[in-house]
Each structure stands twice: as C-alpha cells, then as structure tokens.
Image (spheres, coloured by chain):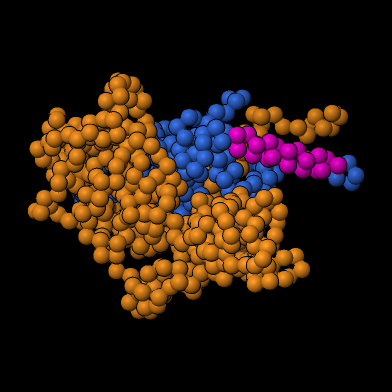
Chain colours: A blue, B orange
C-alpha cells in the first residue's frame, strides 16, 4: 500500500463508492480499501469537527439530545453512506480541498443538529456538494450584529436559548419568522414550560433586543452628531 | 417619532436577520470562509483524543434493527425506544390513522427495549384504559447489561477508591474536575433561622435562586414554620461557568414577597464544594445574620433508557441491568400517557455519563441524554 496520507479526500470518498470509481493507477498507488479510506477521512477531519462541536457549537448542541461525539459519529456515518454526493474539484490534495470537505461535513452536521433539536431523526441529512460555494465572510461582523450580540448577552439563558433555536430556522426573505410547532414543543419540554410560553418569551426577548439595539443606534447617532 | 428615531428603528425582518447573523458564530461552519475562520480561531482536538470511529456501535445498531424487524405481527406494539419516540414526536398522521382510543392505549405500550429477544406474545392486561401487553419476562439466559461504572480518577465520595470520603451531599463519586459540558442543579436544604429571629420566623419564607444571567427561580414557599421545602432542587440547570459567574439566593417573605436577606457567591466547583455543599448564611442589608441553609450542587444529567405508562413495566426492565451502583432509577414525570414514567441512569457527572452511555450503546441499547426537566419527586 502507498502512503495513505497522500491520498486526496476526493480519492478517499470515491473509494467508498467502490473500486469501480477508481482508475487502476489510483488503486495501485494507494492500495485503497474501504475501511482505510474511512479511517483516513475520519482521522483527517474528525479533530477539526469535534473541536467545532465542543467549542463554538457547544451551546447549540446542548439544546439537542445529542452529545458532541454522537453528532461527530453520525456526521461521518452519513457522509460515508452518501459518499456519492461528494463532488471532487480539480485542486487535488490541498488545504482548500480539505476545507471544502469540512464545509460539506459541516452542512451534514448542521442538518443533523437541526433535526435533533426538532426531535427528528430520520430526515436525509446529506447536502449536495454543489451547494457549496464560498459565501464570503458572514455578516456577523457588522456593527449592527455586534449590537445585537451585546443585547443578547443581557438576556437570560432561557431567552437566549429560545432565540438561538429560532435563529436556526431563519429563512432569508421571510418577513415573519415562525418557530415550527415541533421545535416550540421540544423547547417547552426542555425548559419545563408551555409552548405558548415559549412564544411569549421569544416575543418579549425580541422586544428587549430591539429596544436595546435601537437605543444603541440612537446613541451612536448622537455621538456622531456631537463630534 | 422624530426622523432620527425612525432611522434608528429596526423592522422585524431586519431584527430577525441580525439575530440569525449574531448566532451564526455559534453554528457549525458550512462555507469555505467560515471553515477558514474556524480553523484559524480554534485549534483542533488531537487525533489521540478523538473517539475511535465506532464500527462496533454501528454493528450493535444493526443487530437491534434486525431484532426489531423479526417481531411477529402480534408484537407490533413492541418498539425500540427510538421508534417509540419517533412515533410520538414526528408522525401525527400515524396517530390519526390509528384513530381510536384503543390505539392510544397501544401506543402507551410502545415502551420496550429492543434488547429483549422476541418471544411469544403475552396475554394483555387492562391498564390506563387500553390494552397494555406486558413486555416479555426476561429469561435467565438473556444477557444482562452490565453498567458497573467503577469510581476512578476521583477526588471524593465513598465509592472513590483513591480518596474514599463520605460526602454530605450524598455524592458517592466526585470527579476531580467537572467537564465544561456538565450541567448542575442546586439543591437546598432546611432553612434555619438565626436564634434571635426564631419568634418571627413563621413567615412562610421561600428562596429564589439566580445563577449567572439565568432567570430567577423561586423554590416553594414553606407550608408552615421555619423551613422551605426540604431538599428542594432547581428545575433549571447550570454550567460550571455560570456557577462561577455568581449564585444569588434571595430569601423572601411568603405573604408579600418582601426581600428578607440575600447571599451571593461565585461558586467554584471544586471537589470539596461538590462533596460537602455550600453553607449559605443569609444576611440582611446591614450584615446581620438572618438564617442559614445548606446548598448542594448536584449533577443534572441522566441517561434515559425507556418510558412507559406504568412504573411496573420499568421495574421489570430494570432487572435487565447489573447495576451495583444503583444508578438506574425510575422517575415519575409530568408527561402523560405512555411517557408518565421514565427509567434513567443518573444523575451522573460527565465522566460517569459517558462511561455508562457507552456501556449501554455497546450493548445495543438506544439511550437519550437528558437533564430530566420533567422528572418529579423522589425516584424509585
């Protein structure tokens, strides 16, 4: 067997589809076996994904019944099961290819997490690779988003969690964002309150954030005028 | 509203969009740019620290599925926990198809563990208004799931082999350091009034708890005399970080909710704190002592194995487990029908939780980690 560490993600995913997807050269160079390819992909990307799940996504994960390791494993199971939807790029083994893989795995994990928060377990969670585009920097760095983050920090944990889950289901362009009933039910169960209360708390929390952000915006305007 | 005011106002759409952006930082990176940033911001977990890719777990699940599939039609109400949950949570049409009340009774029986080998159907009994087939009796030959979780790498507790130490909190195994994912509840003991205030203590006082920025949670008003509810727990759960940010207990008078005294501390979850608890000394504004109570920081995580309409079925289920630490308990819940009782292991610390969870998963048992928000009263 050749040096498996040199194998590109593309080759590894194609080997999961069976040797038929590989050229003779690829087989002979890498001596690929399905299990080895899985192991390689897992060892290459699991440390990154687990770090994300335990770090920035930890609060979100807490709202689902899944642990970080559960989600990690489930993500890889899904990715391996749907390796046919992994689309190879021309760049070959490279950091950029690895990032594309990680973004794809991230989408699988995100969908699984979303389903877990909703209490669903069976929906297909493998996004198509062609959905992946470089979307540019997220807009959370804008000054208004920073004001929102400051306002959120003043809310109770319960209020934050309710808004956090709502944000998961945000749909671009819809004027009235709606919290799905099953999500509201699940949230109500985890906080020991009624679904109606969840919606009422959400409404109040939104009003608090709005008020706080608007006050900050006015203050900024006043400061700008005085200077 | 002035023109400037109008410019500073946010539409609902703008606000929701901003919220989604703000929370984006907490989501899993799904674009190349986000991945780049995440890679730059956080180091990766070392390869040696990642859990092995669980081939065995996969096999166990496959075994479970095949067992479920070979139930005879007469046993169709025997379902795995996951199937039962899916049924409850996600498939209203199925409920509607069943339609009649009798089918609700059948759903109530949808407890059951796939670790049981399929057996001949047992005669149904009447329970809760519906036909309630009992799960088959465990056979002697059946595998017992061993959930022995020795207390290792610990710093206190009677079960701690390296430092056996009895804890006032009742904990038998105290880890040396809580993990960041651990959740805790506060449990309050009897309230004792300062002796000079004993005469005026019959005020139906109660205690409100606030941890970090959490909502204040008030724990039951005393029925009579000197105490709040004995061993009252918060319903809310808290992380170690939240506790370190500050715990505030407010003692209030029942009849008019007036603030009598308060106590505030940043609580660090040392082994000593988790073993012995906290001695809370309430003082009034001028610093005079008013009352005191004991507070304990309990683990708040459970591994839920099954739910059922009656405790009897779960008692039988419990026999399937070799559980020397008596970690498995049956809880009454606030849910109704088929979820009124829960069989869970816990409360468990993070290390225990993972150990027990994997023991159960390796045995092909589907489980769910929960903080037991709807558990009520003392477990059995």
With B167 as the anchor, is B6 left or right in this view? right
Q: Could you say where residue B8 lies in the image, as x and y percent from the top left? A: 78, 34
Q: Is residue A124 above or below residue B352?
A: above
Q: Could you say where residue B120 lies in the image, as x and y percent from the top left? A: 9, 37
For the stretch drawn in magenta, the main secondary structure is helix
With B366 as the anchor, is B75 left or right in this view? left
Which residue: 36% across, 54% down? B379
Residue B293's quadrant in the figure?
bottom right
With A170 as the anchor, is A20 left or right in this view? left
Quarter of the figure with the N terminus of chain A: bottom left
Q: Which residues are magenta?
A: A200-222
Return the residue found at the far right: A226
Q: In the rendered image, is residue A43 in sight? A: no
User: Depth check: A183 or A110 in front?
Assistant: A183
With B324 as the anchor, is A132 left or right in this view? right
Which residue: 32% across, 32% down? B87
Q: Could you say where residue A212 lies in the image, as x and y percent from the top left? A: 73, 42
Which residue: 84% across, 28% down? B1
User: Depth check: A68 or B281 in front?
Assistant: B281
Q: Could you say where residue A222 lies in the image, as x and y percent from the top left? A: 86, 42
Q: In the rendered image, is residue B134 in sight? A: yes
């Amino acid at each position: 067997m050749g040096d498996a560490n040199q194998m590109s993600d593309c080759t590894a995913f194609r080997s999961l589809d069976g040797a038929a997807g590989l050229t003779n050269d690829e087989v002979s160079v890498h001596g690929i076996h399905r299990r080895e390819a899985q192991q390689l992909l897992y060892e290459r990307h699991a440390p990154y994904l687990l770090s994300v799940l335990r770090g920035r996504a930890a609060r979100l994960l807490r709202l689902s019944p899944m642990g970080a390791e559960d989600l990690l494993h489930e993500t890889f199971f899904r990715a391996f099961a749907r390796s046919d939807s992994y689309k190879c790029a021309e760049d070959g083994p490279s950091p950029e290819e690895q990032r594309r893989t990680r973004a794809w795995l991230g989408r699988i994990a995100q969908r699984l997490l979303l389903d877990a928060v909703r209490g669903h377990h069976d929906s297909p969670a493998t996004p198509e690779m062609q959905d992946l585009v470089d979307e540019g920097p997220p807009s959370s760095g804008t000054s208004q988003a920073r004001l929102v983050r400051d306002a959120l920090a003043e809310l109770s944990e319960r209020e934050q969690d309710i808004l956090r889950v709502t944000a998961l289901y945000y749909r671009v362009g819809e004027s009235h964002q709606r919290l799905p009933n099953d999500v509201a039910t699940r949230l109500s169960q985890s906080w020991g309150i009624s679904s109606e209360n969840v919606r009422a708390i959400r409404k109040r929390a939104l009003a608090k954030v709005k008020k706080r952000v608007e006050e900050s915006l006015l203050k900024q305007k006043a400061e700008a005028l005085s200077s | 509203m002035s023109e400037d005011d109008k410019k500073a106002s946010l539409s609902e759409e703008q606000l929701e969009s901003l919220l989604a952006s703000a929370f984006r930082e907490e989501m899993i990176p799904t674009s190349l740019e986000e991945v780049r940033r995440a890679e730059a911001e956080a180091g990766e977990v070392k390869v040696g620290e990642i859990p092995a890719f669980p081939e065995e777990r996969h096999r166990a699940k496959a075994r479970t599925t095949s067992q479920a599939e070979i139930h005879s039609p007469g046993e169709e109400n025997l379902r795995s926990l996951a199937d039962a949950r899916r049924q409850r949570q996600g498939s209203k049409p199925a409920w509607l198809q069943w339609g009649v009340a009798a089918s609700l009774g059948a759903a109530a029986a949808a407890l059951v563990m796939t670790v049981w080998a399929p057996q001949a159907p047992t005669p149904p009994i009447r329970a809760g208004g519906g036909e309630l087939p009992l799960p088959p009796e465990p056979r002697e030959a059946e595998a017992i799931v061993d959930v022995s979780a020795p207390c290792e790498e610990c710093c206190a507790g009677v079960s701690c082999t390296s430092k056996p130490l009895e804890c006032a909190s009742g904990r038998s195994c105290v880890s040396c350091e809580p993990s960041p994912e651990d959740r805790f509840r506060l449990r309050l003991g009897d309230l004792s009034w300062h002796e000079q205030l004993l005469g005026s203590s019959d005020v139906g006082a109660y205690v409100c708890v606030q941890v970090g920025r959490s909502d204040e949670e008030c724990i039951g008003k005393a029925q009579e005399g000197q105490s709040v509810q004995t061993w009252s727990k918060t319903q809310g759960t808290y992380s170690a970080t939240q506790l370190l940010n500050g715990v505030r207990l407010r003692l209030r008078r029942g009849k008019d909710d007036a603030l009598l005294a308060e106590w505030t501390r940043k609580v660090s979850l040392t082994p000593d704190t988790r073993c012995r608890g906290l001695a809370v000394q309430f003082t009034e504004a001028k610093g005079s002592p008013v009352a005191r109570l004991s507070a304990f920081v309990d683990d708040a995580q459970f591994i839920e194995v099954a739910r059922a309409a009656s405790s009897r079925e779960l008692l039988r289920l419990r026999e399937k487990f070799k559980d020397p630490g008596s970690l498995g308990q049956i809880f009454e819940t606030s849910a109704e029908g088929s979820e009124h009782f829960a069989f869970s292991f816990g409360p468990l610390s993070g290390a225990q939780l993972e150990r027990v969870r994997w023991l159960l998963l390796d045995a092909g048992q589907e489980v769910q980690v929960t903080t037991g928000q709807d558990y009520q009263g003392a477990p059995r």
